[in-house]
Amino acid sequence: MPAMAASANEITKWNEIAITTVNAQSAVTSAPPAASIFVAMVQGAVYGAVNATDRHGRPYLVMHSYPKASPEAAAATAAFRVLNTLFPGTSLQTAYDASLAAIPNGAAKTTGIQVGTMAADAMLAEGHDGRPLSSSPCTFGTFVPGAWQPPAGPTGAPVCDPSPWVKDAKPFLVESGSQFRTPGPLALTSAAYAAEFNEVKANGSLTSTTRTPAQSHAAAFWQTNPAANYNAIARRFVDLYSLDLSDSARLFAMLDLTAADTMITTWADKYYFNFWRPRAAIRQADADGNPATVADPNWEPMFHSTLDPAIGGVGPALGTPPYPEHVSGATSYASGSMNALAEFFGSDELPFYATSSRFPGEQRAFARCSAVTDEVVDARIWAGLHFRTADVQSADLGREVARYIHKHWFAAAH
């Protein structure tokens, strides 16, 4: 008999609280690469606590087993303690009190609280919160063809990456931020680079005549909050497949620990290669040494403040992100997340739908996890933000991180 979905309520409840809490913070914490780390800290602690009460996988954070402890109390305590410590002053006490009130008093509840506390404290002691880390200064440098420079804002000052510290953050389950380093961008003088240059120049332009309305819509659709989006898909899977508490904790741990390690690797790659965005490359192509690339000093990407809201959807004006091009953060986040879900269920073929904050109410249906990554690869080119090599290598990166984490940490779960 399958476990009833109701048994997973504490996991999905605190997952949604975690997403809401993290996204309410300033950009240094809520920007997608940073948010992935804080959500992973919560879900990793929850998994460590629940796995200690119902040992179905390799121990994580809590080495001893506590089979008589309440897994609900352990899960709620782990999530609450991590969030309350990371973001003091947040109003989470009421939600935590409600979680505990639903659990009968007794030794199981008391031990569950203790196990959740152990898991949270162990997670907080690991040092994944890299906000105090020093980051590279955001300044204009001497122009070098191929090298990224921060864009100028309205006042002329550089627009800075809100969370550059992610490139130096401590990974959760992979060995280092360079373990899965990508091959890197194409040589500026190569024919392959010229082909990709001309692809994004034509299809990613604000005034493109080759990009279709459906492609424009897809590009805007995926400019949404990735942590919220992929965790919402996972919560729907919990309901659809009636996952029990233990499997639900493992699902979110696989999803969010993979996403975080993928983003740490991605940000380490971005600042290692420091490659220019299509906007700079196309405007300054006369300096790239490639006769097959022609400069357009007025070229703007589809993601531009003047884009028709009927195309771009609701929310902040779209634009070019203020950090290097290679590799693609949106694509690697999608790939890591969707590959983690496929690894959990043992199949790429899963029916589900995705939503977007830019188009409230729209449900985009998919039959395969990999179909999301495939669409995001193209979407970032249609948006005028990436060369194809960056997106393809990002898709490979997310897949490899997901496979490594599943093989070394979760494959023995049952």
Image (tube, helix red, strand yellow):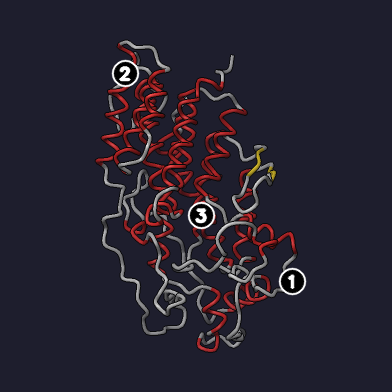
Which residue is identified by label 2? 66
Q: Earlier in the sequence, mark 3 or mark 2?
A: 2
Q: Secondary structure at mark 1?
A: loop
Which residue is identified by label 3? 332
- Quarter of the image holding residue 72? top left
Out of 235 and 248, give the one closest to the viewer: 235
Which residue is identified by label 1? 210
Q: Residue at x 34, y 16 (%)?
A: 109
Q: CA distance from mark 1 to mark 3?
A: 26 Å
Please identify the quadrant where the N terminus is shown. Answer: top right
In the current view of this chain or complex, which residue is farthest to the left?
Answer: 125
In this rendering, would 412 be left or right of 294? left
In this rendering, would 352 be left or right of 150? right
Q: Mark 2 belongs to which amino acid?
A: Tyr
Height in image: 40 above or below 332?
Answer: above
Out of 84 and 55, give the one closest to the viewer: 84
Position of residue 155 measured from the top left corner of the image (x, y, whole percent): 43, 78
Q: Earlier in the sequence, mark 1 or mark 3?
A: 1
Q: Residue at x 51, y 61 (%)?
A: 328
Q: CA distance from mark 1 to mark 2?
A: 61 Å
Q: Mark 3 belongs to which amino acid?
A: Ser
